[in-house]
Amino acid sequence: MTPNHSVASLCAAVALSIASVARADDTSRLDPDLAYLARRSDPVTYDVDFSVVVTAPYHTETLKVWLPIPQSDAAQIVISKDISTFPMGVSPRIGTEKKFGNKFAYFEFSRPEGAQMIRHRFQVKVWELHWDLNPSDIVAVEKWPESFAPYLASESQAVVLNDGMNRLLSEIVPRRTRSYQDIASVLQWVDSHFTYDHVQASLQASSLHAFERQRGHCSDYHGFCAAMGRAIGYPTRVTYGINPFPKNSPSHCKLEVFLPPYGWVSFDVSETQKLAASIRKNEDLTPAEKQALIAAASQRLLSGFRDNTWFLQTRGTDYELEPPAARRVAVVRTIYAEADGEPLPEPDPSAKGQKEFSWMTIHKYQADRTVTYPFKDLRTLSISGTGVRAAEPAESR
């Protein structure tokens, strides 16, 4: 054996040893309840006044409503102030569902006459999160602990896998490596093939809807990505929360993938796609500036990023509420409501032409400082020399 071969063999052995040690160390941190490990920055505190007005059908005997209660974690601190109802005075029952640990305030209105309002006032402090992913640091897992089973399985609704989706995955990733590059390939494929559409949206994080139509809104994008991530072999989940600035529909979801040693990492494919589209249409930018900004947006997505203009309300899909509803829910966006055991239809105020709603949200937010929406403010992409003019603060949108 030549000296060069000896050195190469030694380096390979050392690298293998280091990888094995890393793999052993990281296995001890394979826990779906692991706190976010991202770098935190730029905290913002919001005073939130969130109400929902629910109208049950005429002569409803019992109206049941489940309202998500945001919880504190490593990315946000929540201080609840009060929950009230009007005109009927109903005290909520607070419960936590068993599958993912989501907390809900449950209301039961007996023979409601007309609309009922539920109001929740609270304060939430939110950090911006950066994972700064290095693909070479991500550890492969041969066998995930049983605790990850809900995040790896094909579900009965929402994150569903079928043969057609598996065939499509083979086209997107012809030579599967079970590495982060496989995940990145799926995210990039969705970015280049899906069309954002509020009218043709499932509102249920339906991977099948997204697969069949290749269009929808945030939950369709991220439900599809979650299904593909599970097919690749990584735990995934759809997380729903609220954008605390004026918009027709305050709810928004993100994708999370468990990538050891980084833990749960957040990705927002739909908003990144919309940001890139707005850059392409911006007539004030040169072609070189557009190219640089779009590349920066893609890099931010693939590095793992969660903005401080969003707070988490629920994690996961396809679960039993607490107390149980008449059926399992695919997701809970703002509330879940039933009238005499029948689910009230999900509204989407952002869908042009939709005029009838079983419920509507009323929401007001006050931030403790000026904050801009990073999926519209091009300055947040950290590209110098572009001459980009800043977007308006998120609160004014």
Image (cartoon, grey):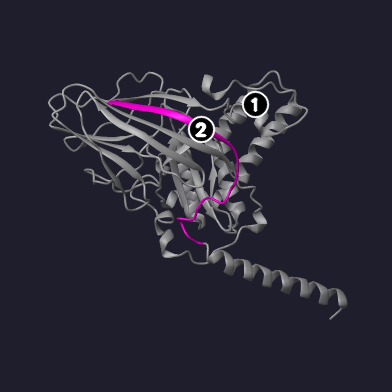
Residue 135 makes an appearance in the image: yes
For the residues carrying marks 2 and 1, which lies nearer the camera in this image?
A: 2
Identify which amino acid the numbered label 1 is placed on: Ile
Q: Which mark is residue 279?
A: 1
Q: Is 91 located above or below residue 35 in the figure? A: above
Q: Residue furthest bottom?
A: 1
Give the residues drawn in magenta, as a range: 30-53
The numbered mark, 2 or 1, whose residue comes first in the sequence reads: 2
Q: Is 287 located above or below residue 1 in the figure? A: above
| Closer to us: 210 or 23 | 23
Q: Residues within 10 Å of mark 2 (few under 14, many from 20)?
A: many
Residue at the disc numbered 2: 45
Task: Let me know if residue 60 is in the magenta part.
Answer: no
Where's the N terminus, which quadrant? bottom right
In the rendered view, does 193 fall on the left or right side of 227? right
Percent x, y of residue 333: 38, 36
Q: Is 330 located above or below residue 3 in the figure? A: above
Percent x, y of residue 392: 59, 20
- Secondary structure category for the residue under label 2: strand
